[in-house]
Structure formats: C-alpha cells, structure tokens
Image (spheres, rainbow, N blue to C red):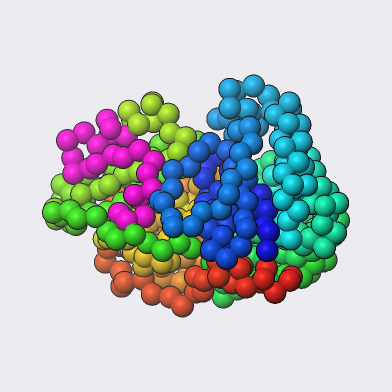
Amino acid sequence: MRVLCHAQHLTGVGHFVIAHNIARGLAKGHDVYLVKGGRPVPRRSALVEPRSISLPILHRSHDGQLVAEDGRGAGEVLARRAELLADAARDIRPDVVLVDHYPFSKWELQSEISAAITAARAANPRVQVVCSLRDIAPRTRYEDMTDDEHAARVVEFLGEWFDALLVHADPKFVRLEEHFSGAADVPVALTYTGFVTESLPPAPSAPHRWAVASGGGADATAFLVSTIRAFRRLAASGVVGDMRLQVFCGLAARPSDRAALDQAAGSGPVDVHGFSPSFLGWLHGAALSMSRAGYNTTTALLRARVPAVVVPGPRLSDQRPRAQRLAAAGLAVVVDSDRETDTAEMADAMDRALSAPTPWHTFDLDGVAATRRFLESGV
C-alpha cells in the first residue's frame, strides 16, 4: 500500500507529531510518504521512518499571519507547494491520501491539498482520501463565521474531497458531536481509532526526583514563568523536598523567551531546556507535570500516568474542553488560563496534584495500530 500523508504545523508541533507517529506506524509495512512543510521538529530516532516530501516552509508569525520561512507573505510559496504536491502525487500514485485535520481548519492550505487529491485521483482512480482528525476540533479563531456556518462548510468539503473520517480519540473520552455541530451530517464513514500515542523512552538517571513543565506557542512564556515561580514557592516551603523542576521551551521560543525563563529560574531548583525530544523521557519519570492541554501532551500524560496540572492555552479552542475532560476523569488539576499568572493558585494546584491518587484510566491508546488496520481494510 502506498500512502501519502499530508500534515502541516503552523504554530506548535502537534499536527506534525500526530502525523509522524501514524506515518511511522504505517511505514513498518507500507510505502509511506510524509509531507514536511513546517519548521523542522527534532524527534527521537526510529528503526523505520517514512519517506519525506519537503516543501517550502510555512508558519504563523506571532501576529497570526501565514508567512514563508523568511517572513514574506505566503502567496507564492502556496502556489509552489501546490505544484510540488501535485507532482509528488502523480509520481507516487498513492492508494491512500491521509490528510491531517483539514477540512476542519487550515483552509489556507486548500489549494495544495486539493491539488494533491486531484492529482492522486487522476493517477489512481481507486485512491481513498481520508481525513485524520484529533480528538477535539471545534472552529478556530481563523474561521471568521458562526459554528453552524463552519460546520456546513466542513461537511461540504468532506463530501466533495474525502472518503472517510478517522477521529483519533476514545469515544469514552469525547465524541465528535460534543464539539462539532455538523457531526450528524458527516457524509462519509466515521471511525474512532483511539488516541495516537508513542512509546515513552526510559527515564533519565538523576540524583533527585523531578517535575516537568512544558509549553509551546506564542503565549507559553508567561505560563512557564508563573510555573517556575510557583514551584520555587513550594520548594521554599519544603513541600516538594529536594525535587527539581525541568522546564522545556517550545519549538518557536525566541531568545527573549529563554531569557525570561532563565531569569525566573535564578538560583532555584530549576533547569531550563530548549525544545528537545528527550522531554518524553523526563515526563516518563516525573513526579509531577505542568503543561498546556494540547493533544500530544495529553496523550503522553495518559500513557505516563503522571500527576498533572494542565492550563489550557487561551487562544486554542480545543484545549479547554480537553482539560475539562481530563479533570472530570480525575487525571489532572486544571487552572484556567485567566489565572495562570497567579503564583499562589498555581502552587496550590501543584500541591493538590501531588496529593491526589496516582492517575488511572482505561482509555484506548492504540490509535496508530487501529489507523493502520482501517487503511489496510480498504476503507
């Protein structure tokens, strides 16, 4: 089976990580091509990797605009990317085109996605086009319309371009109709795969227990600074003993962001790291995690079963409902983003998470294997 996977991360790394994990799983038995069109994302090495289709880089600037790698407008780059993807689809003649998240958002990429699908169908009329969707995908701030208008357009695009919809969630955690008003009108087969996760590496060797804090995106610095201050307060009061805090920056962190974190850490029991694939190992052995409520962070928490404080990103429409579901399942203490700079509240949340029972759940974490089985069945 030949599979063309299209994914694009514009701000954080979440969309690429989900697609990469799926592509790696498929590549163990199939010929898989993964589009890489965002900032390079450091990843742990694996025995089997998909082939890469490299496109000119696009990302969102700090003011939310879609721009090329050099900061110029995205128009010419989008046109070139559409040509490259169409050429690749004609050469590969895929049996499956797997598209991350579109058409639920990322409409700015419509030209290149439709070009790839059109070329794939011309080269192989039996190709199956599948939407690969994370657990929660409400309208984002980039779709300037009502929820019902958004749902109608998504349903229209699904019917025009797609053959199936895979939702990478356990329906016991969340169902599509809970956050998408057009769920009853989806015109293609819908399947829940369970969560897409990856195995956790061994924890590093360290002389003391540790907590981890992570955050990506343009609004992560204030959250991480507040987390450092709250942890230092707990350390000064003796609550966390000799525990150290390991802080991990996001991929797009600027020198000014790192400087703010280093200043907040001072001489306290805090170590600040750049973006690193070693984060999962540190999470695996952590006594406590503080993070946003992104999909990949959440699935890593579900796998690691680490006591957690989650603070949903204020600009991301999926994170608040995901955090609420974690809290309802007894898997995290939630602090609203409006309160994330309140040092006392953050410290109290950490203390409550450390005092809570070890997180336990039965959610399905086998989404990669389920996705592979579904695609192998011929959709």
In percent of width and height, residue 261 lies at: 32, 34
In percent of width and height, residue 67 lies at: 64, 28
**Residue 56 relative to residue 322: left or right:** right
- 281 inside magenta stretch: yes
Q: How many marks?
A: 0
Q: Give the magenta part as a residue range.
A: 261-283
Quadrant in which the C terminus is drawn: bottom right
Residue positioned 59% across, 42% down in the render: 36
Quarter location, residue 96: bottom right
Residue positioned 58% across, 49% down in the render: 51
Quarter location, residue 304: bottom left
Quarter location, residue 141: top right
Q: As drawn, which residue projects farthest toward the front?
A: 91
**Residue 82 relative to residue 288: left or right:** right
Quadrant in which the N terminus is drawn: bottom right
- 102 inside magenta stretch: no
In percent of width and height, residue 174 lies at: 59, 69
**Residue 322 relative to residue 276: left or right:** right
Residue nearer the viewer, 114 or 308: 114
Q: As drawn, which residue projects farthest toward the bottom?
A: 362
Residue positioned 45% across, 38% down in the render: 251
Q: Is residue 238 visible?
A: no
State whether residue 163 is above or below residue 90: below
In percent of width and height, residue 170 lies at: 57, 72
State whether residue 94 is above or below residue 343: below
Q: Is residue 119 visible?
A: yes
